């Protein structure tokens, strides 16, 4: 998933005719000083970070004067919001609010369809609202070919909106659906969409997530797939593998997303905490497992490594050869191995020749690695 910054999302919305408050982007106090007269005050000073809940974290503040804007900007440029450095600020015209609305469309992968979500209680986290007041949220499930048949006006009449407001919301929703299709998104939301006192509907905030699987169709976002990743995560991604860093002390290597998740869950069930995990995928060679072990072991919190491989097109003897090569220089690392499947016997024999034990079941292997790191 590639998540766009608010200012990027709003440029897209504006290109589709959706009203956004007048704004400009700055990356320093000097740049703010040079542009301070572009928009009449009051304004909103908004930290541009790829995380939700900026308002609660102090990343969005109102300024009534240039002096106040400078003061806020000076603080924000020195602030981290949920571990994200603030490198740019969006300075935006403050809108006189009559009402705040939530509008979003997302992919429901479980049910293989889309969901249009609407709430007249915008401006709050939709997840919090769903827990506290679920009746305030309208959800409409639909297949892609059914969107034009959605009668949003019927749902909105119960909220006592005027015909003009209903028309604007309906038009806005159709534009969001166009954007979602044109940019291959898995989420687009406006929270809040502000109904101004003069009756206009503005996108006061915007969140846009581009589906990773479609990035090849959107060259402008390809470089963003590496944004926020560690060097290890970038290296793994370039080799077509999946790697995630966590906060425990056990490194996990598996082949296949399902096996990874089952292994992590079982480690946690028995009281362990994964430090990271790496999915080497199918058909892994000795070079691939060697690379995976180097990445996993580079985490300074690692006390033990669990290798859990179910061989199909992946050959256990190839995995064994990679492990043997790795342990030539890393003998001090505690490692537990479970290999089953294709060339299992050969893999076990290779490991035995080097005095490396192999366990039969995932549960045995997990209990053993927990014993070693405790």
Image (cartoon, rainbow, N blue to C red):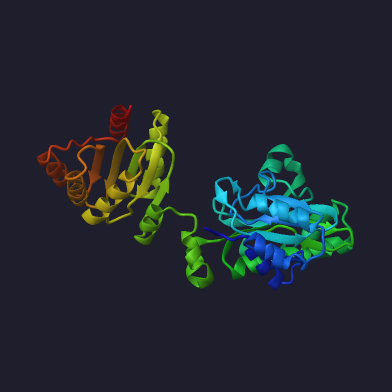
Residue 299 quadrant: top left
- Name the spot of residue 202 as percent of width and height, x first: 78, 62
Residue drawn at point x = 53 percent, y = 61 percent: 211
Q: Where is residue 256 in the image (x, y as percent from the top left)?
A: 36, 50
Q: In percent of the image, x 89 and y 58: which residue is there?
A: 197
Residue closest to the eye, 27 or 353: 27
In the foreground, 76 or 111 = 76
Report the side of 52 relative to 288 (left or right). right
Residue at position x 37%, y 53% from top? 232
Which residue is situated farthest in the left direction here? 353
Q: In this view, does 372 lie above or below 59?
A: above
Q: Can residue 192 be seen in this view?
A: no
Q: Can residue 170 be spotted in the picture?
A: yes
Q: Is residue 89 left or right of residue 112?
A: right
Position of 248 with respect to 211 (left or right) is left
Check the image and report above or below for 311 versus 32: above
Number of on-image labels: 0
User: Where does the image place residue 215, in percent across and percent down from the top left?
Assistant: 50, 67
Q: Where does the image place residue 115, in percent across and percent down from the top left? A: 65, 55
Q: The C terminus appears in which quarter of the rendering?
A: top left
Q: In this view, does 365 lie to the left or right of 135?
A: left
């Amino acid at each position: 998933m590639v998540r766009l910054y608010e200012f990027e999302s709003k440029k897209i919305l504006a290109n589709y005719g959706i009203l956004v408050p007048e704004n400009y982007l700055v990356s320093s106090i000097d740049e703010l000083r040079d542009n301070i007269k572009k928009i009449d005050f009051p304004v909103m000073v908004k930290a541009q970070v790829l995380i939700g809940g900026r308002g609660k974290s102090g990343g969005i503040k109102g300024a009534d004067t240039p002096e106040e804007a400078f003061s806020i900007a000076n603080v924000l440029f020195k602030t981290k919001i949920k571990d994200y450095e603030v490198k740019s600020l969006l300075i935006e015209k403050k809108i006189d609010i009559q009402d705040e609305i939530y509008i979003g469309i997302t992919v429901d992968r479980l049910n293989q369809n889309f969901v249009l979500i609407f709430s007249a209680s915008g401006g709050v986290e939709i997840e919090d609202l769903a827990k506290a007041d679920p009746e305030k949220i309208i959800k409409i499930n639909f297949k892609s070919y059914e969107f034009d048949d959605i009668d949003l006006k019927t749902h909105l009449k119960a909220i006592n909106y005027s015909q003009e407001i209903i028309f604007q919301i309906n038009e806005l929703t159709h534009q969001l659906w166009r954007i979602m299709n044109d940019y291959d998104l898995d989420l687009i939301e406006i929270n809040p969409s502000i109904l101004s006192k003069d009756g206009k509907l503005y996108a006061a905030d915007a969140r846009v997530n581009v589906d990773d699987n479609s990035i090849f169709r959107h060259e402008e976002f390809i470089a963003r797939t590496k944004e926020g990743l560690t060097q290890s995560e970038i290296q793994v991604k370039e080799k077509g593998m999946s790697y995630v860093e966590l906060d425990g002390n056990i490194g996990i290597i598996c082949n296949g997303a399902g096996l990874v998740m089952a292994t992590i869950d079982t480690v946690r069930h028995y009281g362990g905490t994964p430090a990271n995990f790496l999915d080497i995928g199918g058909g892994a060679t000795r070079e691939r497992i060697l690379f995976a072990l180097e990445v996993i072991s580079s985490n300074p919190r690692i006390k033990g490594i669990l290798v859990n491989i179910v061989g199909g097109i992946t050959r256990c003897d190839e995995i064994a050869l990679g492990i043997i090569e790795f342990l030539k220089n890393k003998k001090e690392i505690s490692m537990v191995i479970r290999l089953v499947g294709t060339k299992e016997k050969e893999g076990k024999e290779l490991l035995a020749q080097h005095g490396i034990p192999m366990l039969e079941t995932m549960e045995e292997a997990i209990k053993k690695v927990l014993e070693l790191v405790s």
